[in-house]
Amino acid sequence: MEQLKTENQKLKTAVGTVKGPGETLHEYTFIAPDPDRQLKHGEFVYYTAPVDGSQRQILGRITARTAVKLFPDTFMADPAVPPHTVAAMLGYESDATELFELTVTVLGFYDERLHDFTNPRVPPQGGAPVFIAADETLTELLSRGRQGQLGSAYIGDLLSREPGAVPVALDVRGFTSTHLAIIASTGSGKSYLAGVLLEELLMPYNRAAVLVIDPHGEYDTLQQVQNKEEFRDGGYSPKVRIFRPHDLRVRISSLTLPDLRYLLPNLSEKMHYQLGRAFRYAERTWGEDKYTLEQLLRAVREVGDGAQSEDEAADDDPTTGALIWRLGAALRESSIFNDFENIELDELFQPGMCTLVQLNEVERREQQVIVATLLRRVYQARIDTEKGKLQRTDRNHMPFPVFSLLEEAHNFAPANADAVSSDQLKTILSEGRKFGVGVGLISQRPGRLDSDVLSQCMTQCIMRITNPIDQNRIAESVESVGRDMLKELPALSKGQVIVSGASVNTPLMLRVRTRRTDHGGEDINAPAQWRNWFKHEQPTQAAENALFAEKELERDEDGMLWA
């Protein structure tokens, strides 16, 4: 209790004095000795000012720190003697030997009506005291969500404070309606953070319907939520369902013409034209979403140049024969594309369920077509349900919003490429908000991610980024992160993240909380596995080597005897 009183007293004591306005209208500078090193980069401070007849705390974030008075260089001539000792011997006041000028970016006071910060646009008076903001104040003002409440996602704590002092909860409504981007270099913890978010979405206070596109099979451990008490509430218990590559089925008739063209690269102009005619012929003849591969191949023959019969068209027209061969190679030899089977939407989406679609061992173009098909189907189902075109008994009826999280998003919306999944993602990112279809993108290479796609994600979680191209892409596409925050990207440690956008009240630097489930994306420990091989496999291998050497010796002896 006494320690708490001491801490509160420190917070009420001014830590610095306003020097004057900064370089811009929303900055000011103040001078502070900072002997306890409290005034870190990113720390929140405030001054008080009259606003609308009452005193308000005008919050700001420290964005720069410059020394204005340090020990003279001669005090540091001998590394064995601390400069404080030299200062004391010469009669210097040690507390007055170091001073710093700190630049603060003003956020303003929090307006309850607007649910946002309002900048008074009047700089503080010179000589005004500056205080460090209290933990309780920051907990109240920085998060749009409240930990443990409906629509919140507690992902970590404010980096400038002690662990647990200022918990930060994202507003789930913010990132599920206006989309999310998680950007980080390899090994920075992006998959770990995604796991934390998925845990929060499956908590009893959210019960989300989530689909995860998992190209590397990293999220299997989320199944542990089904056995953990903290995820249960009354009759609610979350479900995690996994579709592995051999479980995936996409009905051929659910593919669009662009899907088919994307699966058959390098088609000639004549092939493009004939495929389009055959596709429309199949839909007219056998009905949309009802024809089989053999019927599609028959349609290719029927619309071939000068076709008299199926066999004649295939034999006489090389374009027809080549197109039939390509369709067969792409669709008949695939274990995923099927004449009759399809993954139904109610198998993928249910409130309180996370579905993992694992695409490891699936060829890249097939991955993109699968993602495009799934997103297109769920988007259309939400449109038709919202407009009343589907009834409760209809197969695609979906009366709840959904959220899809895509790992390795740069593979599904690559920059300067024509992936079939890119167009579908752009459609959902621009219009999905109206129909309750949210998307989250995870990428380690934002420089390879389509800039239009990235710019439409209104909540951003950015971890360590060292590549200059990737940093520039973030600066171009993410408007809510200031330059001072972008400078922090190379210096962030593993598990530290900058969060900005629609789900928080201001850009924040956080340390990600510990996951409740195991992390499935750990790197392989090669030295440990090599050593383990010697422990368990070497005796067997040694026996095999000895037997092989014995046989070689016998062969040599036989050869010598024969000679």
Image (tube, rainbow, N blue to C red):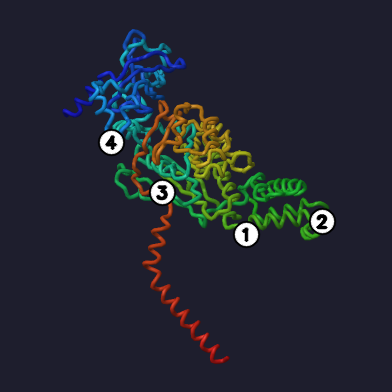
Question: Taking 23 as reference, is 306 above or below it?
Answer: below
Q: Is residue 511 left or right of residue 363?
A: left
Across and down, in percent, residue 310 comes to 77, 58
Across and down, in percent, residue 284 comes to 70, 46
Q: Name the element at disc 1.
A: loop
**Which residue carries the number 3 mark?**
240
Q: Name the amino acid, label 2.
A: Gln
Displayed quadrant of residue 108: top left
Separation of marks 3 and 4 at Cα, in angstroms: 60 Å
Find out whether the residues at labels 2 and 3 contact each other: C-beta distance under 8 Å.
no
Q: Nearer the viewer, residue 110 or 315?
A: 110
Callout in the foreground (4, 2): 4
Which residue occupies 49% across, 54% down? 244
Across and down, in percent, residue 195 comes to 40, 44
Displayed quadrant of residue 90: top left
Q: Nearer the viewer, residue 422 or 511?
A: 511
Which residue occupies 31% across, 35% down? 79
The answer to whether residue 392 is seen in the rendering is no
Q: Which mark is residue 80?
A: 4
**Which residue carries the number 2 mark?**
308
Q: Name the amino acid, label 3.
A: Val
User: Looking at the image, is mark 2 or mark 1 earlier in the sequence?
Assistant: 2
Separation of marks 2 and 3 at Cα, in angstroms: 54 Å
